[in-house]
Image (cartoon, coloured by chain):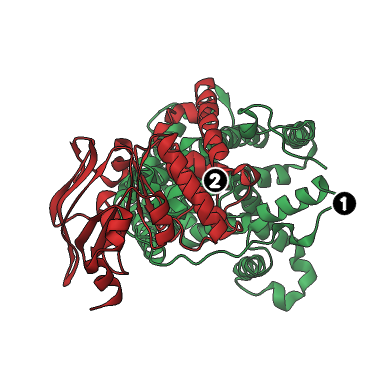
Amino acid sequence: MSLFQAKRLDLRFGGVHAVRDLSFEVRCGEVFAIIGPNGAGKTSVFNVVTRVFDPNAGEVVFDGVDVTRVPRHKIVTHGIARTFQNIELFEGATVMENLLLGCHRDARQSFLGQCLWTRRVRDDEARLRAHVEDVIDLLDLAPHRNSLVTGLPYGVRKVIELGRALATRPKLLLLDEPASGLNPEETRDLAFWIDDIRTELGVTVVMVEHDMSLVSEVADRVLCMHLGEALSTGTPAQVQSDPRVIAAYLGH
Amino acid sequence: MRFDYDTSYHDGKRLLRYPSQWLAYGLLVAGLLIAPWVLPSYYVGELNYLFILSIASLGLMVLSGYTGQVSLGHSAFVAVGAYAHAWLLAQGVPFAASLLLAAAISGLVGLALGMPAIRVSGLYLAMVTLAFAILIEHVIGRWKSVTGGYNGMPVDPPVLFGADLSDLTSFYYLCLAVLAVVLVMLVNLMRGRTGRAFVGVRDSEAAAASLGIWVAGHKVLAFVISAAVTGLAGALLAHHVQYLTPEGFNLLLSLELVLMVTIGGLGSLRGAVLGAFLIGMVPALISQVKPLLGERIARQFGLEIFFFGLILAAFVLFEPKGLNGRWLKIRAFFQTFPLYRKDVFRRGKSYMKSERYR
């Protein structure tokens, strides 16, 4: 069953044709990887899906709903969460606050209720905290719970960002180069977590990744992009042995 | 030594967690309550002014400290609050209603400014708000039928439920009460969903939007809250100065407010109050030390601005986190005694952010 479909997406910036007539679909409960040389348009696809950019043509259908034109801040209410290639954490806040911000859409707090700090608001905060603690447990973030994000090592920040996206209770998780800048040990942890997220939480994962060992380990299917176009789709082994993919990476 | 150890999910959100905190804040409140009975009336008047400045500073802190939007035009909201309050009182509106209405009118003006202004940020926003302040100053100067123009306008004394609050001591308690209510409400708002969203918008708009935070909406909301609180301070200021003229709300007031939040420590309500007290006391302190400076220096024009600049430069160089940062360090020194090291608060390496999309 397909959870997510991109239909004939097209995105241009002036003379740059970032995404050309791209169609793909992601099945419910799979880990889907998008690979390709730099500048292939992988992150642009994410940015179209999360409504940073308006596509020039095509549509995005998620869970049977057309989400091509929903406002940018509403995309998460449809169940799509993402991480960023260059970490976009809230630097001036603690890890806990970052994760609580992930629960923003889940929070039921009226303006006046917050001002008066009513029992209802306090209970809601405790409920969000309980949910955040589940994420902290899953990703082993307990030692950093109350630290400021500034000053934590790069690898930990990557995990916090993953946790923040998970705190939104997504159905589809978009990971933009989750393993970039991680050491081999951290990458291995990440592979386990991605697998946990899929099997235990039932979240479908789409990731852009350059690390082919990680892709082969966790991805069910792979889409290879080149110059904005879909070059090849299939299992990691199929895509890796596709001559067009090899040509795109190594040149003719 | 003290460790934060939560035993329930409510613990992390508690404001006063330890007996020592209850004691410290209890003493502070008790001291403030008996202050007008033991202090000479000059200092009571000064404290009134400092309380009013603190409220205005809290208003600006919501905007600049929490959502990271610069405003060089907050004197305009003080003015709108003051004139609205004075006008409403002159029309016979009861004091309490007039106070709230003045805040609401100022909030509406904030909404009108915020909606176009959030399209720009940083230096450009500073320019927009500055232009707005100049505009408001001129509107007040020209709108003679309501504001009395450059001739000014007298302010009726505050009368709450038949009791005249215009003497120093009653007015002291009024200002203290308003400050306390504003402070508690803002503290609550900032530790809840809205305050977190403000910080999110400040630190990364891209991430905030991806988490479902309506970035534009929260920026405008911060403008409205900030303008309303600052307008409330203006309404109280009207009683403090008793006679309003447009010159009383010039650019220098805006700059002082910016100084308060910067020196206090951006992103902290405690800092806003500390900053207001420090900056608000500078003119009084200068007049105290003037006789010691020798006649030639004492007679110089612009000593205040010189000292404002000096204080700002010193803070930027030596304590960029402001008075609040200094306070946290002193507190940590005692809490972790004797383990405190100089490097405890040293910031770790911060990673470069490149190619941020807004």
- The amino acid beneath tag 1 is Pro
Residue count near mark 2 (Cα–Cα under 10 Å), binned few <14, some 14–19, many ≥20? many
Query: In which chain is the residue bearing label 2?
Result: B
Choose mark 1 or mark 2, whichever is in front.
1
Residue at 69% of width from left, 57% of height from top?
A: B284
* Image position of A14 with respect to A118: above or below: below
Which chain comes out red in the rendered image?
A
- The amino acid beneath tag 2 is Leu
A41 lies left or right of B301: left
User: Circle 2 is placed at which residue position?
Assistant: B58
Return the x and y of residue A116 as percentages of the image width and height: 52, 27
Return the x and y of residue B168 as percentages of the image width and height: 65, 37
Mark 1–mark 2 distance (CA, rounded to whole Å) = 34 Å
Which chain comes out green in the rendered image?
B
User: Circle 1 is placed at which residue position?
Assistant: B338
Q: Nearer the viewer, residue A23 or A195?
A: A195
Q: Nearer the viewer, residue A87 or A228?
A: A228
Residue at 72% of width from left, 46% of height from top?
A: B42
Q: Residue A188: which numbered mark, if any?
A: none
Disc 1 on helix, strand or loop? loop
Residue A230 visible in the snapshot: yes
Return the x and y of residue B3 as percentages of the image width and height: 76, 40
Query: In which chain is the residue bearing label 1?
Result: B
Residue at 74% of width from left, 67% of height from top?
A: B290
Q: Quadrant of residue B93?
A: top left
